[in-house]
Image (cartoon, helix red, strand yellow):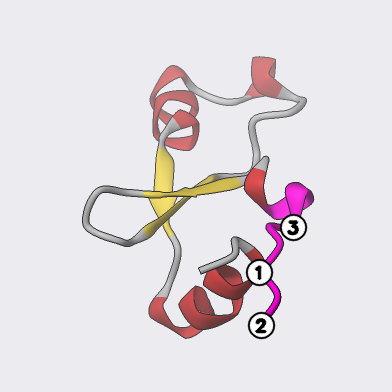
Amino acid sequence: MPKNKTKTAAAKRMRFTGTGKIRVAGCGMRHHLEHKSAHKRRMLSRDSILPKADHKKMSGLLGR
């Protein structure tokens, strides 16, 4: 049986946590940052956990 290949585009954008959840970088931190408050920029810079509904599809892309 062949090995599962990791989709490199997905691997650059998400990774697994120690407990098996998928951590993704959020959106909204690319441009127009001078118009966003410091509080909003801090909140947007954090990574978020992928919802359970997308977990099966994305873990397949990551080769698990």
Look at label 3 and name its amino acid: Lys
Q: Which residue is at 30% across, 61% downward?
A: 20
Look at label 1 and name its amino acid: Lys
From the image, state whether disc 1 or disc 3 is nearer to you: 1
Confirm or deny contact between disc 2 and disc 1 (CB under 8 A).
yes
Q: Who is closer to the viewer here, 50 or 17?
A: 17
**Which stretch appears magenta?**
1-10
Instruction: Find residue 7 and name its label.
Output: 3
Q: Quadrant of residue 13?
A: top right
Residue at the spot of label 1: 3
Residue at the spot of label 2: 1
Q: Which residue is at 75% across, 48% downward?
A: 8
Q: Main secondary structure of the magenta part?
A: loop
From the image, state whether disc 2 or disc 3 is nearer to you: 2
Against 39, residue 13 (above or below) is below
Q: Which residue is at 45% across, 64% downward?
A: 50
Instruction: Find residue 52 and name its label.
Output: none
Asked whether 4 falls inside the magenta stretch, the response is: yes
- Left or right, residue 50 beside residue 62: left
Indicate the secondary structure of the residue bearing disc 3. loop
Q: Quadrant of residue 58?
A: bottom right
Look at label 2 and name its amino acid: Met
Q: Who is closer to the viewer here, 34 or 54?
A: 54
Q: Who is closer to the viewer here, 14 or 62?
A: 62
Asked whether 16 falls inside the magenta stretch, the response is: no
Against 23, residue 57 (above or below) is below
Indicate the secondary structure of the residue bearing disc 2. loop
